[in-house]
Structures are given as C-alpha cells and as structure tokens.
Image (cartoon, coloured by chain):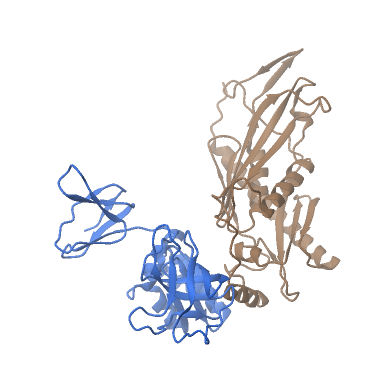
Amino acid sequence: MSATVLPGTVVPAQHANLKLGPGLIQKSDAGAAGPSIITTRTGTLNHSSNGSKWWVESNSRRYVPAPQESVIGVVVQKVGDGFRVDIGAAHSASLDGLAFEGATKRNKPNIKIGCVVYARVSLAHKDMEPELECFDAQTRKAEGFGEVKGGFLVRCSLKMCRNLLDPKHFLLPLLGARFPLEAAVGMNGRVWINAKEPRQIIAISRCIEAVDPDGGGMDEAGIKAFLGTLDI
Amino acid sequence: MRPPSPSIPEKEFLYTSLKESLRLDGRLSMEIRSPTLTFGDDLGWVECSLGKTRVLAQVEGKMVKPPPERPYEGIITIHSEISPMASNEYEPGRPSDEEVTITRMLDKVLKRSDAVDKESLCILAGQRVWHIRLTLHFLADAGNMLDCACLAGIVALKHFRRPDVEVVGDEVTVHEPTERAPIPLAIHHTPFCFTFAFFPDPTIPPVIDPSQLEQRLSAGMISIALNAQRELCVLQKLGGVPLDPDEVLKIVIIAVQKAKELNGVVEARLKEDWEGRHVEVR
C-alpha cells in the first residue's frame, strides 16, 4: 500500500514494536489521545507487511547525515590529527586520523587534501558536525572503507543512490556484464566509479545521469538503446 | 561558501579523457549544448537553457527624463545579480569573480556594441525618453553562464515590444497595446557570445561551452562575441594561458561558424513564437 502524502499528514501507525523510518516523527499531543505520528516530507507512504516499520519514500539532492550510513567524502582540510571532509551536507564532517584499520600514532594513513574517501557516518546530530569512521562498526576492519584512488566521482539524486545500492536494480549488473567496473555508492548523492578505459567511465557516468529520476528516469530498454549509441 | 576544489580523481580523470578528446557529457570538443528558448506570456520574457544551465531574461520599458548631457538618446540598463539559487557557491551581496566578469561582459556585448539603437528610443528631446531595463536571473549553474546570459539577453531584447507613442507638438500620447500594436526595438545587429576553455597542459585542445567541472579545472578562458555578419564585437581573454595568433584565429573561425548556426535557430524560434501569438487588429 503506498499513498502519496504531504508534510503534516497524520499516519495511522499502531504496533507494539513500531519503528519509524525517514520522513516520520512522533509528536506527543498534550490534549489529544496519546502521541500521534506525523509525516515531515512529501512522498509515498510505505510500511512493512506486519505494520511494524513505516517510512516515507521521497527524493531530494541535499544530504542530511544519519548514523551508520556509508558516504563518499572529499578531504578539504587537515585539522590537527584528523581531517575535515566535505560530504555535501550543511556541515563538513570530521574524520579522525586514527579511524582507519590498523592505524596507530606512528602509522597514520597518507591522505592528502583532495583525496576521496569512502567512510561511515558514526555520529550525526542536527546542529553538530557529523563524524566519520573508515572501518566497519562491528568487525573494526576496513571492509572497503578508506581512501579510493583513481576513477571518477559522479553526482546524482539521493533516490538514485538508494536504487544503485538495491541488488535488484538493473543498472550496475547491466553495465558489469559489458565490461568490468568498480563502484562505491555513497548515500549522500555521490558515486565513485572506476573502469579500465576513460570511455567506459564516461559511459557509466552518462548512464547514471540518464537513469536518475531527476534527469529523465530511463528504464532498462532505454539504457540498452543508449549504450548502443555510445562506442565502448 | 567557497566551492571546494574538485577532488584529485575528478581532476586527473578530466585531464586524461580530454587528452583523448573525450568530454564527460559525450560532446565533441567543438560542440555546444543546443540552446532551448522558452517564451513567456509577456513580451520580452525569455528563459534560455544550455543543457542544465538556465538563465531568465526580462525586459521592461518606462518613460523618463533623459540626463542633460545626452538629451537625444534613450537609456538601457542591465541588471544581473547571481543569487544562491544558481548554485550554493554564490553568496548574496558579495559579487564573486565570475559575477563581475559576467556583468562586465554583458555590458560590453549588449550596451557598448550598440546592439540596440538608442536614438530611436527618444520620444521628446530633452524631456522624455525610453528607459529599457533588462533583468537577468540566473536559475541554475552547470557551467558557462556567460554565454547563456548573453543569449537570453539579446533574445529578450528582440522579443520585446514597446508601446506605440504619438508626439503632437509638445504633447505625448502613449497608446495602449490594445489600441495600437506595440513596436519592436530597433536592433542593429544580434551579437552572440561563445566561450572556450583552455587547460594547463598545452597538449589538450580547447573546448567550447565548458561544463562546470571543465570551467573549474581550466587554466584560462577566451570569450568571443560576434554576430552572424562576421563582425567581432568583443574578444576577452581571462587567465594566463599563452596563445599563438594562429590558435586565436582558429577559434575565431569556429565561433563565426557557430554564430551563423545559432542565428538561424534564434530567428526560427522567434518566428515560431510570434506566429503563435494572437495580435488583434481593430
């Protein structure tokens, strides 16, 4: 069931273990009967089959940091022991120099200004600077986080990033069947891509822009025709 | 907020692919994004978009008393302020370098090149002249706002119609658009602007109509304003990239070619829009 909602719509969500996803907040009314759940965004309202998880599906380009999300950042400044990283949010994030796998005071990663890092948001509050870490929360190992070298950075909308992370989405497997590629998808609207030839990287970048819901939202057939026109 | 410099992978990839003459959006080195012109209900309201770069131009006219040193000419003023709507790098109130460049270039291309005949804007010498005000709003910045702004400006001036005015002795009667058909401005020629970007590595050839990343990573830019009759209005070179006279001539020849094509497109669009408008004659 998915109905289109506007901000401020009251949602009839009742469950013992209710979990609210993006776009919903709980307001405790002083007069009315108990707390009510209200939407804060425009989009389609969805919920899981047993009614315990509810969320609003919407699209935007501006990223709001949330903990445990993987993002792609660009290092802009070296601050003491750590770095200041731009992740496209309202504040720059801080990344400690020791927040890498196997980093000690003597053995720090060699990261310069302008490097691209794939990191995880460890702390995110509304008015504070978000903090990043370059290792997995449970295993404390790199698991792909850290500096990414070479390749290219593509900007896209937030919904497109979520689509690319979905294993059932068609785009990356379709491109991967044609030529080998590497991709790191950040939840902040940035995707790092790498392939052997510049032509291939340009093709991936243009495909991502074409499939983006903001820029046309081409479907699978359209992309196959589009790939035919590029010479890879 | 100052824009962060492009990251190292973006920089290296751009230079690598430009060496092979591959642009990131699939265009050829000398291919401009095809312009889309949208006209509004009011005459003189035009939105021009070059790919994702969008600029809105609006022309208004009102009657004022001319300054005593120039009693026989009308007045044309251009207002262009980049708001943060274009991109989150621009701050309101503080003109960035790019904004100053655009304002100066628009002044040279549209005012100082005498595109619009100012003497025809005179109604009663020393007493009443037309003050034509061109306002430009920058809606989105995806590189090369200058060319987009110049195009929007000149098309808006061509699209605008001012009310018909009758002068009998010292009496001035302004006719409503419903009484008498409004008349177009007297335009001598239609200048178009083309910008080319050069890169620090001299083996990389120049590209026309740079996108935002190409503009940020360029070492210098050269802008040429000319009309379809092969007359150069302005040639402006920014940045310290040394150029041979042959290279400059090559670029000018390409710009001449593009100006002719663009002129054809603009004339066709203006004609199409004019035919769609209902002009009642009573």
Q: State the residue in front, B59 or B77.
A: B77
Rendered colour, chain A: blue
In this picture, residue A225 sits left or right of residue B188:
left
Residue B99 drawn above or below residue B117: below
Evaluate whether residue A232 shows in this view: no
Residue B60 picture location, percent across and down: 63, 32
**Which residue is at the front of the view, B81 or A109?**
A109
Question: Could you tell me residue B51's position as x and y percent?
Answer: 56, 57
Q: Please give the name of the residue rendered at 68% of the width and 21% of the height, measured from the top-left corner.
A: B165
Residue A216 position within the rendered picture, expressed as x and y whole percent measured from the top left: 44, 60
Q: Quadrant of the C terminus of chain B?
A: top right
Q: Which residue is situated farthest in the right direction here? A: B245
B177 in relation to B19, above or below? above
Numbered disc total: 0
What shade does chain B have?
Answer: brown
- Depth order, front residue of A169/B254: A169
Residue found 39% across the figure and 68% down from its top:
A123
Q: Nearer the viewer, residue B25 or B258?
A: B25
Q: State whether residue A87 is above or below residue B105.
A: below
The answer to whether residue B246 shows anywhere in this view is yes
Which percent across, then down, holds residue B75?
Answer: 74, 32
Residue A152 quadrant: bottom right
Q: Quadrant of the N terminus of chain B?
A: bottom right
A75 sits to left or right of A162:
right
Q: Is residue B48 above or below residue B280?
A: below
